Amino acid sequence: MDFSALALSPPLLQVLEELDFKTATPIQAQSIPVLLQGRDLVGQAQTGSGKTAAFALPLLQKVQLQHRKVQALVLCPTRELCAQVAGEIRRLGRRLPGLQVLVLAGGQPIRPQLEALEKGAHLAVGTPGRVLDVLDRDALETRQLSTVVLDEADRMLDMGFREDMERILGVIPPRRQTVLFSATFPPDIEALSRNFQRQPVRVTVESTTAGPDIQQVRYDCEPEEKQALLLRILRHYQPASAIVFCNLKATVVELKKSLSAAGVSVDGLQGDLEQFERDRVMAKFRNQSTRVLIATDVAGRGIDVEALDAVINFDLPMQAEPYVHRIGRTGRAGRAGLAVSIVTPRDGRKVDDIQLATGVKLERGDVESLPSADPRNAVSLETTWDTLYISAGRKDKMRPGDILGALTGEAGGLEATDVGKIEIQDHVAYVAVARRVSRVAFQRLSEGRIKGRRYKIERVK
């Protein structure tokens, strides 16, 4: 669809022509008319689909330049994305005289941002933590806010910003327009939409890549060869995150020991773990400080990792139904999934039942083509992340932005790219940091302060 057919104002059409943007992308063509009508919208599109312009152009069309009050707020997960989105809005709005777009993001002193708010701005782009700080200081007037955009909402939830997002939406007048963009739609996103949007229009743009697809492969061997074969499979596929399912708790313990000795980033999940131990294991797996998680079906209940590269059945389950549940954890959000099963001669009946239940014949993999299990030929299966534990959580009013600020601010000195997933639980928090700077991060948090207080910091092993 041509942009001229989207009822945009002459200054915006002029800029689009200057930028040589002639045809709207699918997400733009479907979203812009809805947003110009003032309706709530849920948009599902991948990065690179043109979604920033999809919400930026309607914001710019509706902005009242004569009023130097923040009229629209865009929430993004990181400072870098805030700067990128604000830059794109300024670029598209360059023909709007006097347009002021303000970035409210952590990792930078708050005073200049507060001063800029006092002088007046039309649009604000910010991270949830910093926006909350500004709201808590009564520095951001909400009466004029007519639109809130949650950009990359799934990533913000993944980083632990759910409570911050809900608090922000809770203080903005309910008559607002609420726009939500997300690459994936886990249950938390659906709940956010249900609680804070009014009859939203749903726009979904399918990825140009193949839809959700799980490749199901079997590798055959004798029972005594299974451990060596598992290592060869991991070295061949090199998953960033994989769950290996076993039928017995003793097998979990045994495999964790053997894979760890072979240099694999691995942890185990079985019923004998205390809850705090399970929490730590899962926090490390969710933030990719652990690449391979070994689990029984019972211990694996409730594991829900959005981007799981592979599921490996070290032991085939006794029935087909658990197999379906196991492999359903991979191949989500338009990503290709991989399910690998190790099959011994005694597993023939199980394979028949699985193929009957799924309607898919397991593809036979060539064992001879797999890398050797010899450690001298090893491909690294280590992780590039470490996890730090912090002795304060949601009930202590700890927020992801507080931790990110402590690590990337003047005292911390880390780059935002050195900080991974931040997970806030009720009374504890976990943060992934790049392994190459983990000692520095640990030292800075241990010797420094978060929100003016010292907390117990541990490196989670």
Image (cartoon, rainbow, N blue to C red):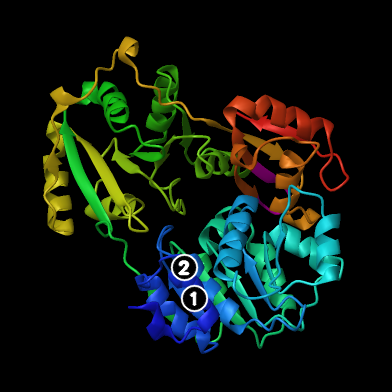
Q: With 421 as the anchor, is 45 left or right in this view?
A: left
> Can you say which quadrant of the picture contains the C terminus?
top right
Residue displayed at 52% across by 61% down: 152
- Disc 2 vs disc 1: Cβ atoms closer than 8 Å? yes
* Quadrant in the rendering for residue 5: bottom left
Q: Is residue 426 magenta?
A: yes
Q: Amino acid at mark 2?
A: Glu
Q: Which residue is mark 1?
A: 14
* Quadrant in the rendering for residue 50: bottom left
The crowd level at tag 1 (other Cα within 10 Å; few <14, some 14-19, many 20+) is some
Q: Amino acid at mark 1?
A: Gln
The crowd level at tag 2 (other Cα within 10 Å; few <14, some 14-19, many 20+) is few
The label shown at residue 18 is: 2
Q: Is residue 103 visible?
A: yes
> Can you say which quadrant of the picture contains the N terminus?
bottom left
Q: With 116 as the anchor, is 105 left or right in this view?
A: left
Q: Is residue 190 visible?
A: no
Residue 211: x %, y % from top left? 26, 60
In the image, which residues are magenta? 424-430
Task: Quote the CA–CA distance across marks 2 and 1.
Answer: 6 Å
Residue 95: x %, y % from top left? 59, 73
Please tell me which residue lies in front, 217 or 278.
217
Q: With 229 as the anchor, is 107 left or right in this view?
A: right
